[in-house]
Amino acid sequence: MDKTVIEYIANLSRIDLSEEEKVFFIHQLSNIISYIEKLNRLNTEDIEPMSHAIISSNVFRGDEPVVSILREEALSNAPSKIGFFVKVPKVID
Amino acid sequence: MSLLQSTAYQIKNKIISREIKSVDLVSSLFTRIKHVENNIQAFIVTDEKKAIHDAIEIDKRIERGEEVGLLAGIPVAVKDNICTKSLPTTCASKILQNFIPPYDAFIVRRLKEEDAIIIGKTNLDEFAMGSSTENSGFKITRNPWNLECVPGGSSGGSASAVAADVAYMALGSDTGGSIRQPAALCGIVGVKPTYGRVSRYGLVAFGSSLDQIGPLTKDVRDAALLMQVIAGYDSCDSTSVKVPVPDYMEGIESDVKGLRIGIPKEYFATGLKSDVHTVIKDALKVYKRLGVEIIDISLPHTEYAVAVYYIVANAEASSNLARYDGVRYGYRSNNAQGVIDMYSKTRAEGFGNEVKRRIMLGNYALSSGYYDAYYLKASRVRTLIKNDFDAAFEKVDCIMSPTSPVPAFKIGERANNPLEMYLSDIYTIPANLAGIPGISIPCGFSKEHLPIGLQILAKHFEEKKLLQIAYAFERETDFHLKKPPLNVSSLQGA
């Protein structure tokens, strides 16, 4: 973990970091990652990866309209809006 | 014992028989909240007006002889990462400071259907990421047993509130121990149900393959009562399971004679504090007296669980928390130039350090070139951990261990060392990875008179058995009746 890597993942994470914070997180994340690397002691070649603890399958429902929350309610928490639209800074120049 | 110190089960019958009124109970509870909240800081928000209003309605219905729900008139607290319509839900994060959900979580709807009185929302580590409730964006919750100590976390507000008798019962969420560990550190009962047993609809997502909602209560019977209300299938959560919900109260007194209890040697290794070890050994003696068979077992991949967890949980978190972008709800930075800058500044200003650390760690583990080495590797080791449990349950009916290697630690003691904090959850994390249910019950005290919890784990969907096993211990002991030394004498309101 170095400055290039932390800047890369901070950008992926869309989190602005100050120079000070970069140093702070490089140190902490390096410690955690070296701890995590203990997993490499295990041979897992023939082991299936597991993403869920219980057997699960896709859940489908009929394509039928159901009652949902109102548009006003859905927009009630938006930090900025115009009418029934959420307002954001200009996306395309 | 004052009414506020009673259990939900005890007051439930008094309310229904009209021996006491729910509104009187709620009023004295809020008086007590005003007295102790300065010390323990368990709540992010309380709603006295609504609680009183709801209590009056329940009392009227009881007076008219109407049928009422399982939790009629009982004051319940809800962890603040569970959505409550019209009541703020902040996840203890500045990024959701002003968020008021337009809907109720499934389990909140269930509480209301059963006529519970929701008194407020409890503090947590921001987005449930932590083991001490020190990572809250708003306040630090304290342990009622020693105000200089943490209550554990992340459901620290719920645990502290129940331990201090300012809520009869509370709901929490458990991704790696966040119900069981604070329950242990505050001397109460906490249950993490089987993954899929309780709907997560309306629970703000952290690690979606690990998160479960569960009860924090004063005793085992109350845990059974609350499980009865929250367990069950919900079409709004596609991981919710259509397994019939048993009657958790029925047969809770069943004896445990002949039960095979597995003791995993890896849970009694380095890092376990000696007085915790002693108390757990004494607890096992109680079970021996009841005629159980103690069997030494091994869960050989235990030492890898924390590493697996911090990859899997954070990978899921990095994806789940991508939704906080300042667009549709929550905080938005005013200092940004353009939309990408708005995302990055909003998240920089809105999230605390622990959340940032975990999002970045998760994105690192999922990023191109690292995915196989971290995420895929962790997912394979997760299988090994689950296989350990499968093999153990061939030989034993349940597994017992300490819930936490240490009792409550001092506020600030671990705050600057994330890795050390992560290791607080070493005994609770494996159950989340395997999806099995677990319970923590009070089983004694440390030298400093801090509570110690006994963890019991069982196979998928065996909550009923867990509750029976836990109740057998509770019936033989009085640890669950001990109260923290908060000044109660001046507060005998009810």
Image (cartoon, coloured by chain):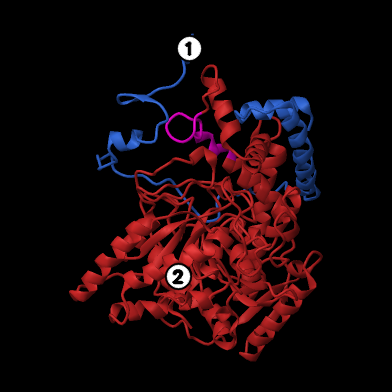
Chain colours: A blue, B red
What's the residue at 47%, 71% (across, down)? B223
Q: Which residues are magenta?
A: B318-332
What's the residue at 53%, 34% (across, down)? B322
Q: Where is mark 1, residue-wise?
A: A92
Relative vertical location of residue B56 with respect to residue B13 in this rendering, above or below: above
* In the image, farthest residue toward the left: B64
Instruction: Give residue B170's mark.
Output: none
Image coords of residue B361 (percent x, y): 68, 39
Q: Chain of mark 2?
A: B
Q: Nearer the viewer, residue B353 or B210?
A: B353
SS of the residue under disc 2:
loop
**Is B220 on the left-hand or right-hand side of B278?**
left
* In the image, farthest residue toward the top: A93
**Is A72 on the left-hand or right-hand side of B229?**
left
Image coords of residue B17 (percent x, y): 28, 82
Q: Amino acid at mark 1?
A: Ile
Q: Nearer the viewer, residue B389 or B273?
A: B273
**Is B380 on the left-hand or right-hand side of A26?**
left
Q: Where is mark 2, residue-wise?
A: B168
